[in-house]
Image (spheres, helix red, strand yellow):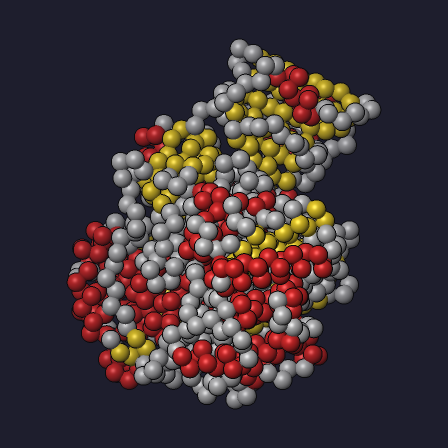
């Protein structure tokens, strides 16, 4: 087996993967034991990568207005469109919207073309939505966008504080490293600060379920507490920082005491006091934060409120301590390095520094250097909407799903003169709004570098043949640049050549003034680039092996070389709940899905964990709204509405509702939460308020609900609600509608028996009075499809029926149980899948825990294998053991 060492394309942990082409259109993957990010581990998503590389749904050829064209025709069309619009309306009438899925080399040429040659800074990345507040906070505090620490710090810390970070689901391998360190050192403490009780709380010593948006008060309170309790390191303050007095004053004004802060954050005083005491008295503290902090209209202030506390205690730049922003996407960091954000120039240089603008102009020999920032993501699509931007090239991202106020984004694109989308997937909500489609090489086909959350640059390498006529993104950008008359500056023949130029720019006129410096890699040979081992920047001639920790010398990258405290005046979220929209919507990820499902939605094992968009509500809210667990509900905000399945849980704060971000028009009708999300942004970072949208929740009572399981994908008629998920040998559709068909039998047969099959047989059962219908098609005694309908949510278990699709022959008993809608005793319903790797369901686990007396995760692993591969399900296994224990006691 020819294994290639590459990097996982999902989250910012940046795990190393050993991959090879498998049978058919699959890949065989395992964790790279030598990669320093994961040392062989993979989470459920990484472990299922092999199921996502097939060509089903791939965009294989260039298209203009739905017609296949040659690459030359497509690229000529794009270049001509951009040239015409630039000449008629100026360079700011065009834009690129790029992505943390791009490789650094793709990003580099896109940024160079827009900022140096087109002459606009209208290039922004979807990383704007996940971590731009961290970038802004870093720059305010350190003078540079620098993550100070490394993953070892998380294992060396005596106290880990996770703020707005469900690492167990969103950065699972990092969480596994943290868990392992805690198991080795049980005396170490872990605190989770999050409005929700998430899977990360599984190993927490303390959970602070703060009110949404109150993080800045919490950390201002900590800054006050550190001062009041004599825990400030004044020597460090004097030597390495500035602005402490103003920051402390602002903290005391807004968060003077534990009772004030506890009330503002909605938490118990003794819990708050415990957190402050632990932080104050523990030397090695790391504060990890991610989207819960960043995705806010005051996200930058929240980031600085966290950093202030580390500066006040001098806990930065040393082993086991520091503020630690973890990024969402595999190459969000690479985008920051090249200048993929509209307010950055390139190589960590800035528009507001004329020397930087001059350096980049000279280095690129740029004829049309942009000299001021461009439009950030939300503003960029507003400019598309109002016609200021007339041409946009969207690369490797799906803004019609992921941006806030997403319906408006869709409308904006529909009326835009020229929308070009380069993607590896043919049908997305965004490709549906484009005129030109350019097929991009996918993971496994492309070659380049990515940077993870700890500044570690790793290679993504090719191990699969390129699909159809797909090409790397960097190649497309260079081809368009050539057609715009910039051939010489974009004459790259390989990602290696681009990487060398990127490294050279980072060192150009640098003299130690900028920490993003890859000058040690400027002369990297083609062979050395091929073999490049993971390395953390800066990589200079003096630090040829990279740098694991920054700021150890107490020197920063501000003009004074001192770190800056920022005075934080906490602000409430931009839109508060009101009579019309009394609850707060929070959005985020689920364990086994990634972004807008374009990749993980192809994997049966990943799709089995969460089948539908859901809305998690506190039991008190559910009771008040007369909503049962598993019922359908509607959510409304000022910007849009959606339908989701209710999940009732006391993990939610009363008044809050959580909805996952993944579903879109390809996988669900009305499942796109982005349509509801508040488009308010942080004034410094431009990051939207994705964690705080006022909403109204209402029960939804359609005339009927049902589901279909079919061996083939279906063309559904128009329905008010549907969701599709792929299974092992079937597609599963959840359905609901306010309109009843005239007769169920003909409706079902038209949908499921359209193809003529020998030995096909349709069996059905109707109880009109009870509003119940069941139908199944058997082909040669093998289950081909089935439909179950009721006038409420009480429908047969789906997992059992899914199991029947694995059988070549149904027994008499199976046939009877099929129409009865009750599993036979030979086919117990395993229930919703908890362990994706081994397909172990919740009913199987609950029964084994009860009947076999399993009391540990290890015992479950021995019995059922669950939890013994990637470990992503361990928090859920522990929760099941705990629930069983509680049931026994009661
Ligand atoms: Fe991929 Fe999982 Fe590692 Fe993230 S934690 S990089 S999703 S394997």
| Residue at the image position 62 percent from the left and 30 percent from the top | 716
Q: Quadrant for the N terminus, please.
A: bottom right
Near-viewer residue (445 or 807): 445
User: Looking at the image, is 353 positioned above or below residue 287?
Assistant: below
Near-viewer residue (89 or 626): 89
Q: Position of residue 557 (x, y in %)?
A: 38, 80
Near-viewer residue (763 or 417): 417
- Rendering quarter of residue 136: bottom left
| Residue at the image position 52 percent from the left and 31 percent from the top | 721
| Residue at the image position 52 percent from the left and 59 percent from the top | 88
Q: Position of residue 389 (x, y in %)?
A: 48, 55
- Rendering quarter of residue 687: bottom left
User: Looking at the image, is 758 positioned above or below residue 108?
Assistant: above
| Residue at the image position 56 percent from the left and 84 percent from the top | 520
Q: Position of residue 461 (x, y in %)?
A: 67, 67
Q: Quadrant for the C terminus, please.
A: top left
Total of numbered circles in the picture?
A: 0
Residue 256: in sight, yes or no?
A: yes
Q: Position of residue 285 (x, y in %)?
A: 36, 69
Q: Viewed as shown, does residue 96 lie left or right of 277?
A: right
Q: Viewed as shown, does residue 211 lie left or right of 146?
A: left
- Rendering quarter of residue 104: bottom right
């Amino acid at each position: 087996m020819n294994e290639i060492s590459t990097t996982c394309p999902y989250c910012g942990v940046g795990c190393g993967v050993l991959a090879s082409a498998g049978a058919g259109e699959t890949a065989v993957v395992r964790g790279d034991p030598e990669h320093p990010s994961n040392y062989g581990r993979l989470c459920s998503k990484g472990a299922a990568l092999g199921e996502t590389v097939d060509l089903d749904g791939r965009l294989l050829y260039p298209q203009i207005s739905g017609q296949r064209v040659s690459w030359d025709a497509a690229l000529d069309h794009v270049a001509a469109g951009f040239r015409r619009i630039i000449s008629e309306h100026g360079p700011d009438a065009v834009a690129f919207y790029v992505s943390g899925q791009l490789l650094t080399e793709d990003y580099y040429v896109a940024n160079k073309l827009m900022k140096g040659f087109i002459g606009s800074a209208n290039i922004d990345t979807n990383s704007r939505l996940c971590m731009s507040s961290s970038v802004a906070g870093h720059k305010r505090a350190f003078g540079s966008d620098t993550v100070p620490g490394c993953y070892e710090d998380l294992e060396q810390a005596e106290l880990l504080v996770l703020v707005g970070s469900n690492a167990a689901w969103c950065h699972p391998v990092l969480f596994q490293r943290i868990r392992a360190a805690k198991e080795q050192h049980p005396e170490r403490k872990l605190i989770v600060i999050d409005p929700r009780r998430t899977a990360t709380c599984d190993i927490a010593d303390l959970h602070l379920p703060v009110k949404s948006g109150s993080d800045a008060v919490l950390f201002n309170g900590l800054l006050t507490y550190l001062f009041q309790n004599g825990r400030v390191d004044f020597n460090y303050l004097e030597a390495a920082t500035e602005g402490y007095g103003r920051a402390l004053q602002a903290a005391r004004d807004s968060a003077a005491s534990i009772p004030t802060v506890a009330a503002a954050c909605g938490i118990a005083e003794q819990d708050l006091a415990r957190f402050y005491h632990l932080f104050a008295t523990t030397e090695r503290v790391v504060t990890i934060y991610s989207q819960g902090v960043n995705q806010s209209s005051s996200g930058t202030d929240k980031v600085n409120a966290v950093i202030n506390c580390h500066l006040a205690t001098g806990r930065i730049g040393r082993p086991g301590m520091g503020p630690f922003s973890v990024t969402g996407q595999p190459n969000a960091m690479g985008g920051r390095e090249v200048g993929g954000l509209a307010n950055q120039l390139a190589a960590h240089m800035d528009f507001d520094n004329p020397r930087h603008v001059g350096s980049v102009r000279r280095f690129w020999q740029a004829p049309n250097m942009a000299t001021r920032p461009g439009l950030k993501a939300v503003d960029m699509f507003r400019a598309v909407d109002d016609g200021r931007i007339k041409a946009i090239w969207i690369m490797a991202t799906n803004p019609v799903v992921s941006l806030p106020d997403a319906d408006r984004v869709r409308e904006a694109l529909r009326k835009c003169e020229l929308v070009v989308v380069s993607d590896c997937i043919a049908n997305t909500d965004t490709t549906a709004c484009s005129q030109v489609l350019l097929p991009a090489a996918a993971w496994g086909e492309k070659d380049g570098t990515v940077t993870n959350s700890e500044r570690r640059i790793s290679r993504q390498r090719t191990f699969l043949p390129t699909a159809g006529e797909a090409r790397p993104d960097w190649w497309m950008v260079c081809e368009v640049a050539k057609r715009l008359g910039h051939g010489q500056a974009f004459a790259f023949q390989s990602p290696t050549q681009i990487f060398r130029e990127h490294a050279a720019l980072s060192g150009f006129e640098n003299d130690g003034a900028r920490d993003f410096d890859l000058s040690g890699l400027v002369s990297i040979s083609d062979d050395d680039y091929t073999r490049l081992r993971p390395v953390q920047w800066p990589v200079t001639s003096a630090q040829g092996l990279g740098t694991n920790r920054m700021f150890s010398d107490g020197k920063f990258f501000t003009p004074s070389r001192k770190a800056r405290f920022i005075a934080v005046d906490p602000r409430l979220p931009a839109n508060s709940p009101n009579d019309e929209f009394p609850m707060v919507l929070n959005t985020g990820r689920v364990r086994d899905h990634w972004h807008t499902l374009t990749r993980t939605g192809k994997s049966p094992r990943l799709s089995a964990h969460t089948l539908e968009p859901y809305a998690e509500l506190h039991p008190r809210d559910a009771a008040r709204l007369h909503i049962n667990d598993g019922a359908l509900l509607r959510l409304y905000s000022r910007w849009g509405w959606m339908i989701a399945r209710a999940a009732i849980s006391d993990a939610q704060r009363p008044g809050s509702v959580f909805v996952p971000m993944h579903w879109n028009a390809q996988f669900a009708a009305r499942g796109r939460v982005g349509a509801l999300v508040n488009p308010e942004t942080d004034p410094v970072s431009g990051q939207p308020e994705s964690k705080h949208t006022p909403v109204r929740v209402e029960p939804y009572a359609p005339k009927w609900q049902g589901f279909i399981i079919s061996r083939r994908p279906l063309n559904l008629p128009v329905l008010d609600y549907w969701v599709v998920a792929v299974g092992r040998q079937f597609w599963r559709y959840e359905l609901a509608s306010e309109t009843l068909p005239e007769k169920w039998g003909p409706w079902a047969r038209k949908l499921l028996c359209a193809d003529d099959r020998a030995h096909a047989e349709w069996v059905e059962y109707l109880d009109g009075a009870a509003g119940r219908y069941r139908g199944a098609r058997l082909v040669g005694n093998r289950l081909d499809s089935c439909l179950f309908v009721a006038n409420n949510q009480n429908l047969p278990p789906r997992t059992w029926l899914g199991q029947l699709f694995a059988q070549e022959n149904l027994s008499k008993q199976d046939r009877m149980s099929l129409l009865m809608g009750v599993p036979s005793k030979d086919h117990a319903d395993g229930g919703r899948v908890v362990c994706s790797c081994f397909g172990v369901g919740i009913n199987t686990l609950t029964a084994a825990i009860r009947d076999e007396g399993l009391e540990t995760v290890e015992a479950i692993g021995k019995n059922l294998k669950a939890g013994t591969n990637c470990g992503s399900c361990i928090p859920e296994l522990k929760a099941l053991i705990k629930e069983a224990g509680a049931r026994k006691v009661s």
